[in-house]
Image: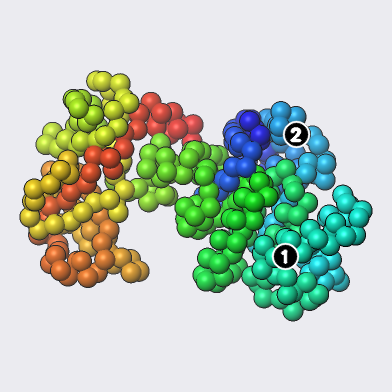
């Protein structure tokens, strides 16, 4: 394991990080998400060495760095408010850290130009930071951190002060630069797009704890905690019982009159489980249709909620509420109205089974 955070506890008086465990392989990109005040920044700063943990250990490539000075850890940190040296131009800002490691001016120059080229800031190298836009400043800050080839690059909401277009543009550039430099990265963000477009790993924090860490697709489809499910937008998560298994399909009884069919077969029989269906995987129709889709249910629309450019439709199916998401035009075309009958379909691959043991252990540790 490249970075191993073990049972970390940090006491800041009114706030505590408790029992935090994190594991990252070299070159992994992890995004940490969680509500405001959950301890994301404190965790990054503890890894960087600015807070001393009461208990727990941090290992980097097997070496215990828990008590190592921040400057000896080889960890760079980039903040939201792009801190640059105001008395140095862009070139000097980027070269600053490198000059401590490399003495040859030509090598420094060629590395700075290479990095500036990757982040599309070559034309700005002789400018002063105060003349730059937010996106340009942030690219300079990232260039400066990345060029020293840190063991880990920590980024605390690096894009949150930028507009949507700049954010999208920077995401692409930075993803490529970080991957070319083979840098291990932990990135705190409030933006789910960052998770999908940048990360292999995601960790969800709440109240100073990590509720779940794992591969993005797993955490988003198989949240093992109700809070994580809500936070990552699964919304349909039910308790159930495995009642049958055949030909690669597991049948899970959710209530007396409702059985869902899942392609997850890696479960113990006769066992209580949780099943999760993401709202965007539910297809609405006015009548039942012939198809290979395993789950076709009939229900009654109980609520229609307009949220931005999308519509949430809540449907009661034999006493269980499903939430789906559609566009306003589909809502019109299908004539979906409160109290009307509607059909829901979703594929068995989109019904994820979560072991209850796993989910309950997460619940109790939270
Ligand atoms: N130096 C400190 N001393 C005492 N408490 C602190 C200190 N730094 C942070 N805290 C507290 O720790 C808690 C977690 O703060 P943190 O900044 O890590 O949250 P966050 O998850 O990064 O939130 P946000 O998404 O708003 O940035 C907060 O209640 C904060 O007040
Ligand atoms: Mg923060």
Disc 2, ligand 1: is the CB inside 8 Å? no
Marks 2 and 1 in Cβ contact (< 8 Å): no
Residue 112 x/y as whole percent:
78, 61
Crowd band around label 1 with a 10 angstrom C-alpha radius: few (<14), some (14–19), many (20+): many
The image quadrant that residue 220 belongs to is: top left
Residue 23 x/y as whole percent:
59, 34
At x 19% / y 66%, what residue is drawn? 331
- In the picture, the disc for residue 66 is 2
Vertically, is 184 above or below 196?
above
Q: Is residue 251 visible?
A: yes
Disc 1 marks which residue? 116
Image quarter (top left, top right, bottom left or bottom right) of the N terminus:
top right
> How many numbered marks, from 0 up?
2
Indicate left or right for 33 with 149 as reference: left
At x 74% / y 61%, what residue is drawn? 114
Q: Nearer the viewer, residue 260 or 97?
A: 97
The image quadrant that residue 167 belongs to is: bottom right
Residue 84 x/y as whole percent:
77, 66
Disc 1 on helix, strand or loop? helix
At x 30% / y 21%, what residue is drawn? 268
Indicate left or right for 333 with 56 as reference: left
The image quadrant that residue 223 belongs to is: top left
């Amino acid at each position: 394991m490249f970075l191993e955070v073990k049972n970390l506890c940090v006491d800041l008086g009114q706030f505590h990080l408790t029992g935090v465990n994190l594991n990252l392989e070299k070159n992994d990109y992890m995004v940490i998400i969680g509500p405001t005040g959950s301890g994301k920044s404190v965790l990054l700063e503890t890894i960087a060495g600015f807070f001393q943990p009461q208990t727990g250990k941090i290992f980097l490539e097997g070496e215990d760095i828990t008590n190592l000075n921040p400057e000896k850890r080889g960890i760079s940190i980039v903040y939201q408010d792009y801190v640059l040296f105001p008395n140095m131009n862009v070139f000097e800002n980027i070269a600053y850290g490198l000059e401590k490691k490399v003495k040859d001016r030509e090598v420094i120059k060629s590395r700075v130009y290479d990095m500036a080229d990757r982040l599309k800031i070559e034309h700005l190298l002789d400018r002063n930071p105060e003349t730059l836009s937010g996106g340009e400043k942030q690219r300079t800050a990232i260039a400066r951190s990345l060029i020293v080839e840190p063991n880990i690059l920590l980024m605390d909401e690096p894009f949150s002060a930028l507009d949507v277009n700049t954010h999208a543009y920077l995401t692409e550039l930075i993803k490529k630069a970080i991957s070319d430099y083979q840098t291990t990265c932990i990135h705190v963000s409030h933006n789910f797009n960052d998770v999908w477009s940048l990360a292999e790993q995601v960790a969800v924090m709440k109240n100073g704890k990590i509720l779940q860490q794992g591969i993005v697709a797993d955490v988003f489809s198989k949240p093992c905690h109700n809070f994580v499910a809500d936070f990552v937008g699964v919304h349909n998560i039910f308790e159930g019982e495995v009642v049958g298994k055949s030909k690669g399909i597991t049948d899970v009884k959710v209530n007396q009159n409702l059985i869902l069919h899942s392609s997850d077969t890696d479960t113990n029989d006769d066992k209580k489980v949780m099943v999760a269906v993401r709202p965007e995987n539910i297809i609405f129709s006015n009548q039942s249709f012939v198809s290979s889709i395993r789950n076709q249910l009939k229900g009654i629309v109980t609520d229609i909620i307009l949220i931005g450019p999308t519509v949430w439709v809540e449907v009661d199916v034999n006493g269980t509420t499903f939430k789906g998401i559609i566009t306003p035009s589909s809502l019109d075309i299908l004539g979906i109205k409160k109290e009307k009958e509607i059909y829901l379909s979703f594929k068995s691959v989109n019904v994820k089974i979560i072991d209850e043991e796993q989910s309950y252990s997460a619940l109790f540790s939270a």
